[in-house]
Image (tube, rainbow, N blue to C red):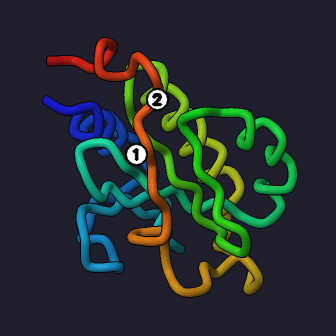
Amino acid sequence: MTLAQRALRQLEAWPDLTAAPASCGTGRALRTAHSEIVHFHSDRDVDLHLTSRALRRFAADLAESTAIRLLPGSRWVTVHLDCDTDVDLLQTLVSVALKAHQGGPAPEDLPPGGCNLHRVTVLPREGAAAAAPR
């Protein structure tokens, strides 16, 4: 089982999330009653929808993480899953996204142009191959 499959399985059990096809056409999404929160695009790449307020609040921390890719102007954050810690980070960020989206996204938080699929290139981190599950 890949890291993304494991994360998807764990997050599908959360009561506030429902699985559906991703609106971008690639992979699975988890959504609330109001909006899509996360897209699982591949065995390692996941896009997470945050609000502009949450992005501002956590921008410095997100920018320092080697698992996170930020795209200027996008409300979606790409998380690259290379190890168990990245899955933990994803779960934490999904929790942040759920809290941020309570009651539905504000108009400025509707993701322009959709998620980051095909807009972000993720290069493997050094030592990630050794840490990846087999």
Count residues near mark 2 (Cα–Cα under 10 Å), then give few for <14, some for 14-19, many for 20+. few
Instruction: Find numbered disc 1 in the image and state the secondary structure of the residue it sits on.
Output: loop
Tag 2: amino acid? Arg
How many numbered callouts?
2
The label number, if any, that marks residue 108 in the structure image: none
Q: Is residue 127 visible in the rendered structure shown here? A: yes
- The picture places residue 69, in percent across and down from the top left corner, at 59, 51
Residue holding disc 1: 15
- Determine the CA span between mark 1 and mark 2: 33 Å
33 on left or right of 18? right
The label number, if any, that marks residue 125 in the structure image: 2
**Earlier-in-chain disc, 1 versus 2:** 1
For the point 37% across and 49% down, which residue is it? 45
For the point 65% across and 68% down, which residue is it? 75
For the point 40% across and 16% down, which residue is it? 127
Query: What is the quadrant of residue 62 in the picture?
Result: top right
Q: Nearer the viewer, residue 55 or 73?
A: 73
Determine whether 13 is above or below 20 in the image: above
- The picture places residue 112, in percent across and down from the top left corner, at 61, 85
